[in-house]
Image (spheres, rainbow, N blue to C red):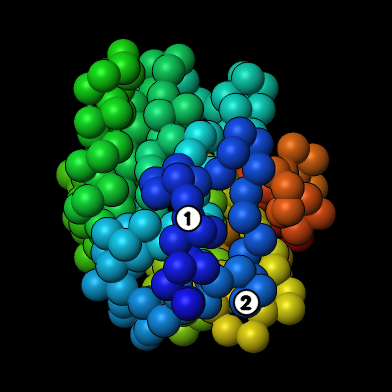
Amino acid sequence: MASTAVADANAGGFGVGAAGVGQVLDGSNPAIVRLRQLVDGPQSSEGWRRCWEQGVTPWDLGEPTPAVVKLVQSGTLPGGGATVLVPGCGGGYDAVALSGAGRSVVGLDVCDAVIQRARQRLSSGSTPNVTFVTADFFTWAPPEPFHLIFDYTFFCALDPSLRPAWAARMDELLRPDGELITLMYLPQDQDSGPPYNTTVFDYEEVLKPLGFFIESIEDNDVAVEPRKGLEKIARWKKTPAGTETPI
Ligand SMILES: C[S@@+](CC[C@H](N)C(=O)[O-])C[C@H]1O[C@@H](n2cnc3c(N)ncnc32)[C@H](O)[C@@H]1O
């Protein structure tokens, strides 16, 4: 019964969301129940691979999230040779959307099956400035740190015990003058995860001690249903070494 319900919930396989609509991401959704069975521990790379292989991907919109499109259109992102990392990129739609204007983007995911699919989709399109990499965010060693890192539904997907390590990696992977953009999905009433209960303070708690500060934060007014009212977008910078963190 449960597997039929999950199959129904994921009727489209990869990219299950109808345009502009996501699934309910809590325990009332059989696909979330199954996801939680598959991702069963803090270091569950294997669990995430099983999710993708079995089509248990209730978070997947099958298209870029509207906030990324809005960001790109805003003209406020670095261009002209800037390098961008999208960790836990999943289907890679946001990574592709962030390319252009001279930016080169790396979409990183621990699941090779989804990275292969993202590469195939790329080869049928015309976005040469995107590279998809299969690797573990916590151990991957790129040649150079990035100008921009974009995180969406990665922080909230990780076991909360990994949050300090997530922040330390952001610090290592970002240039000192770089920018971290967190599109924060902030669920409050989860019994477990993923996605785990998350607040803005949870981000601040791990990022601020490393010298990150919020340059701007606003509600995501273009969130898909049913994430409306549950998302904020924050743009973080790092304080130059030896200076005080702005309040
Ligand atoms: C909730 S999904 C979000 C995917 C994508 N950001 C989106 O919004 O559609 C979390 C993603 O993180 C990936 N992931 C989990 N742990 C990872 C790790 N340690 N390193 C890299 N990717 C990881 C999973 O395979 C999955 O694709």
Q: What's the mark number on residue 10?
A: 1
Residue at point 48% right, 55% down?
A: 10
Residue at point 33% right, 42% down?
A: 107
* Distance (Cα) linking label 1 and label 2: 15 Å
Q: What percent of the width, then of the height, locates residue 137?
A: 30, 60
Q: Is residue 195 left or right of residue 170?
A: right
Q: What's the mark number on residue 35?
A: none
| Front-lying residue, 177 or 11 | 11
Label 1 residue near ligand 1, CB within 8 Å: no
Q: Secondary structure at mark 2?
A: loop
Q: What percent of the width, then of the height, locates residue 224?
A: 69, 43
- Figure quadrant of residue 104: top left
Amino acid type, label 2: Gly
Amino acid type, label 1: Asn
Mark 1 or mark 2, whichever is nearer to me: 1
Q: Is residue 174 visible?
A: no
Q: Provide the residue designation for mark 2.
A: 27
Q: What percent of the width, then of the height, locates residue 181?
A: 56, 46
| Front-lying residue, 98 or 25 | 25
| Front-lying residue, 14 or 89 | 14
Q: Is there a contact, CB below 8 Å, between mark 1 and mark 2?
A: no
How crowded pointer 2 is (Cα within 10 Å; few <14, some 14-19, many 20+) is rated as: some
